[in-house]
Image (tube, rainbow, N blue to C red):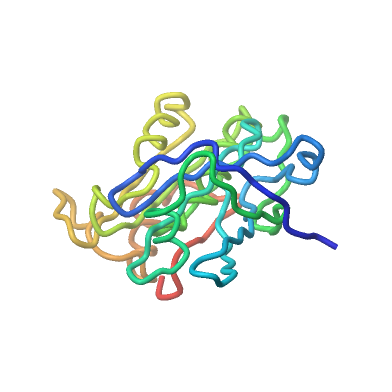
């Protein structure tokens, strides 16, 4: 049965004004239990005002990185996310349970597939891991990402995504959709609802066939 283990914060950085990247390290003797697959999540626990509080966050690093990095959106009134933002520092400890989750598919270097992701907000945390791992593992595959946010300033992983685009210019396509920011093209303004997804598919993928599609975002999406 899985149980919690001590995990030390080794890096804490701001991704956007309201999101944080938190990197954890566990003791060498339990490190093999924290091997993960792309798209998995990590339950973590901390004592806040004398109460044990547990949350689950997606791992946003690729499998090749072997790095327990979590993408955390700081929610208004969020007990755990605000504790992370305001009180936890490098060197502090939390507790972590080994990674879990089945939001992934097996990868193989000899495959050449077309993957698509429709994602919104902090849903990019597991998707970024999936996209990066896939591009690093399957040199013949490509990924098309449709990513919805309020504004560019609140878009998590925007710089890492452009970094991936620079590494894999022919195999990664990024399409950003903003609900509170204008664009020269109406197609890229609004929310990723059913109608918008249909329009994006017809405009961008009319001549393509997706082998696998990932969907990750808040319930209204």
Where residue 116 appears, as percent x and y from the top left, is: 51, 50
**Which quadrant, please, contains the C terminus?**
bottom left
Height in image: 170 above or below 21?
A: above
**40 sits to left or right of 80:** right
Q: Residue at x 35, y 41 (%)?
A: 158
Where residue 17 appears, as percent x and y from the top left, is: 28, 50
Where residue 12 appears, as percent x and y from the top left, is: 45, 41
Viewer-side residue, 193 vs 89 = 89
Height in image: 133 above or below 44?
A: above
Task: Name, please, the residue furthest toward the right.
Answer: 1
Where residue 166 appears, as percent x and y from the top left, is: 40, 25
Task: Name, please, the residue furthest toward the top.
Answer: 167
Task: Name, please, the residue furthest toward the bottom.
Answer: 220
Numbered circles on residues, count: 0
Q: Residue at x 54, y 45 (%)?
A: 92
Height in image: 109 above or below 37?
A: above
- Which quadrant of the figure has residue 132? top right
**66 sits to left or right of 154:** right
Viewer-side residue, 41 vs 206 = 41
**Which quadrant, please, contains the N terminus?**
bottom right
Q: Residue at x 14, y 54 (%)?
A: 182
**119 sits to left or right of 76:** right
């Amino acid at each position: 049965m899985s149980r919690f283990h001590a995990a030390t914060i080794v890096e804490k950085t701001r991704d956007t004004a309201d999101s944080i990247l938190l990197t954890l390290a566990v003791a060498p003797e339990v490190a093999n239990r924290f091997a993960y697959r792309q798209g998995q999540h990590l339950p973590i626990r901390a004592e806040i005002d004398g109460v044990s509080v547990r949350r689950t966050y997606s791992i946003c690093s690729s499998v090749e990185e072997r790095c327990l990095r979590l993408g955390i959106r700081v929610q208004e009134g969020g007990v755990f996310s605000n504790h992370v933002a305001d009180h936890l520092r490098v060197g502090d400890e939390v507790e972590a349970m080994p990674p879990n989750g089945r939001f992934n598919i097996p990868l193989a270097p000899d495959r050449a597939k077309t993957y698509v992701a429709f994602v919104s907000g902090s849903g990019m945390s597991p998707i970024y891991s999936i996209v990066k791992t896939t591009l690093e593992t399957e040199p013949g595959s490509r990924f098309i990402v449709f990513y919805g946010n309020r504004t560019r300033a609140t878009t998590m992983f925007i710089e890492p995504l452009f970094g991936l685009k620079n590494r894999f210019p022919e195999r990664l396509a990024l399409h950003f959709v903003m609900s509170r920011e204008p664009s020269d093209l109406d197609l890229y303004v609004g929310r990723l609802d059913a109608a918008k997804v249909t329009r994006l598919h017809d405009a961008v993928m009319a001549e393509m066939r997706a082998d696998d599609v990932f969907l990750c975002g808040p319930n209204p999406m």
